[in-house]
Amino acid sequence: MKNLMDVRIEEARTYYVQTKQTLYMLFGSLWAQVVQKEEFEATHSRQKADIAFLEDHGDELRGAAHETLIRQRAKLLATEGGIKASVLAINILAGTVLQIAKQAISIRHGADISDCALQGRLISGTCVRDLIWIGRNQAMHFEETNETKQPGIRKSGWVDLFKILNTHHQGAFSLAPPFQSKAFEILQILGWSRFDQYESDMQDLGVAPSHE
């Protein structure tokens, strides 16, 4: 009869295999959104330059310039909407990656972060385990901070981690409102631009089977 440890290892590896294809698709979609966001940002810069030119030379160009300026401002608003939509999609996808990774750790080790004695690589004053677990919590509950006053909203455990991260990545993990998901920034610190590094980290945390 298998002991609890063996059962957890088997279940975690089964979950890892079952989610592998999903993660391939998530990583592909994530980086496609990153490219799209960069394209929107390049377009945004060009549109702002065009608007600045028209505003500076409007009197010289007369009526046609005024109509063009109205159209360019409308296009700028649409581009800004595209940037916001891309940022939202990026963080939803990144948050889903963290959720899958965190669930794998929970299956393997237990329902609390302290159940996992393995920490993985040390990065930016913390470790892979904490980046995954607490980063996932922040992505799902970023409105919950230690300073939250609203009734029924519990205090969150991500604030202390973000204080550490912000000392290593100044401004990227600011605790000033408005709060938003930082799932993508967490993935960048983890170096999860490709599946290989994700797999290596999952092996270090006892989730994924070793290739040896």
Image (cartoon, grey):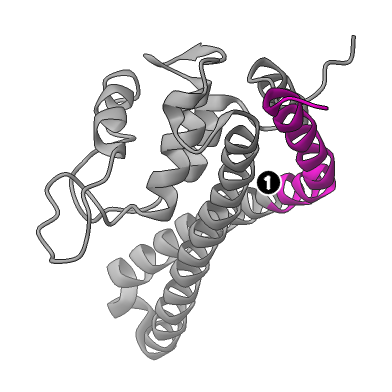
x and y percentages locating residue 80 in the rendered image: 44, 67
Left or right of 12, for residue 50: left
Q: Nearer the viewer, residue 107 or 200?
A: 107
Query: Mark 1 falls on what kind of element?
Result: helix
Q: Quadrant of residue 124?
A: top left
* Residue 24 versus residue 51 in the image, above or below: above
Q: Residue at x 19, y 52 (%)?
A: 177
- Main SS, magenta region, reads helix
x and y percentages locating residue 57 in the rendered image: 32, 70
x and y percentages locating residue 122 in the rendered image: 49, 11
Q: Nearer the viewer, residue 22 or 27?
A: 22
Q: Say whether residue 155 is visible.
A: yes
Residue 88 drawn in magenta: no
Left or right of 28, for residue 128: left
Please tell me how crowded label 1 is: few (under 14), some (14-19), or many (20+) other residues with Cα within 10 Å.
some
Left or right of 43, for residue 145: left
